[in-house]
Image (cartoon, rainbow, N blue to C red):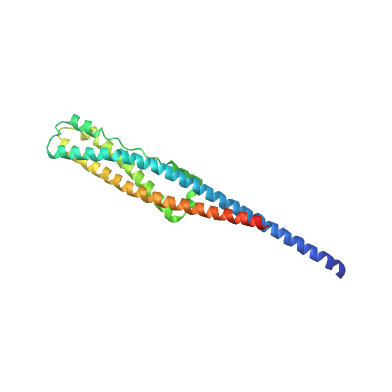
Amino acid sequence: MPAKATAVWLPRVLVESALIVLSILVALGLDEWRENRQDEETVQLALSNFASELRQNQARVDDAAPFNRGLRSVMRNRYENGEIESVDEFVNMVESYAPVVLQSTAWETALATGSLAKMQYNLVSALSLTYSLQNRYQLISRLGMTELTSPQNLSEEKLNLAVYNSIRYLDNITRMEEELGVIYDEAFLVIQTAMTTTAGEQSRRNYMEARDTTQQ
């Protein structure tokens, strides 16, 4: 190829190649920006769902706790004074307890959508601890009530033992309700911090985008 033709062709090829590389880099940058923005929106939605669900669950535990503490006190006093004299009386007292139903939809949704992978470790750890304690509380509530009201444990000969076990059961339930109250408060604090941080990052990014657009 003549040197003159090469001198004309080469700069054009270099410019076109540079433009192609630049367009690819811009496209990749836009894709990353869209992905990051979608991730932030996904995390914000998940955090909002967590906050709403945990508030509802805390309200249910708070509503049930005073009755459960009262029932435990009544049963302990009557047990110590030998005032529970029949199986029917015991069953009526025990069956007044109703296990609390707590929701875990937000956690299950976050697991299914991969939202947890986009969150900070301390946030995921706090949420995991909260829902683990919730699940244990519900499991103990259901299994304990089933055990206490099992026909094989309800006889006049086993009445004192059944009453004693029911008091221990309510001790465990009320203690876990107190633990849940503390865990809920800590979880709300971590969620609020994460929501504020994510919102701040989004606002800062929007400002930078608006500034860049104005300067262009």
Between 166 and 102, the one lying in front of the other is: 102
| Image position of 83 with respect to 118: above or below | above
| Image position of 56 with respect to 123: above or below | above
Q: Residue, x 32% and y 46% (percent of image)?
A: 181
Q: Residue, x 46% and y 45% (percent of image)?
A: 48
Q: Furthest residue to the bottom?
A: 3
Picture quadrant where residue 173 is located: top left
Side (left or right) of 54 relative to 206: left
Decide if residue 109 is in sight here: yes
| Image position of 75 with respect to 18: above or below | above
Picture coordinates of residue 57, whole percent (x, y): 37, 41
Q: Furthest residue to the left?
A: 81
Picture coordinates of residue 114, whole percent (x, y): 50, 48
Decide if residue 28 is in sight here: no
Q: Furthest residue to the top?
A: 88
Q: Furthest residue to the front?
A: 214
Side (left or right) of 12 relative to 130: right
Q: Quadrant of the N terminus?
A: bottom right
Picture coordinates of residue 78, whole percent (x, y): 15, 37
Count of numbered circles on the image: 0
Q: Quadrant of the C terminus?
A: bottom right
Picture coordinates of residue 189, whole percent (x, y): 40, 51
Q: Residue, x 22% and y 40% (percent of image)?
A: 72
Side (left or right) of 145 relative to 42: left
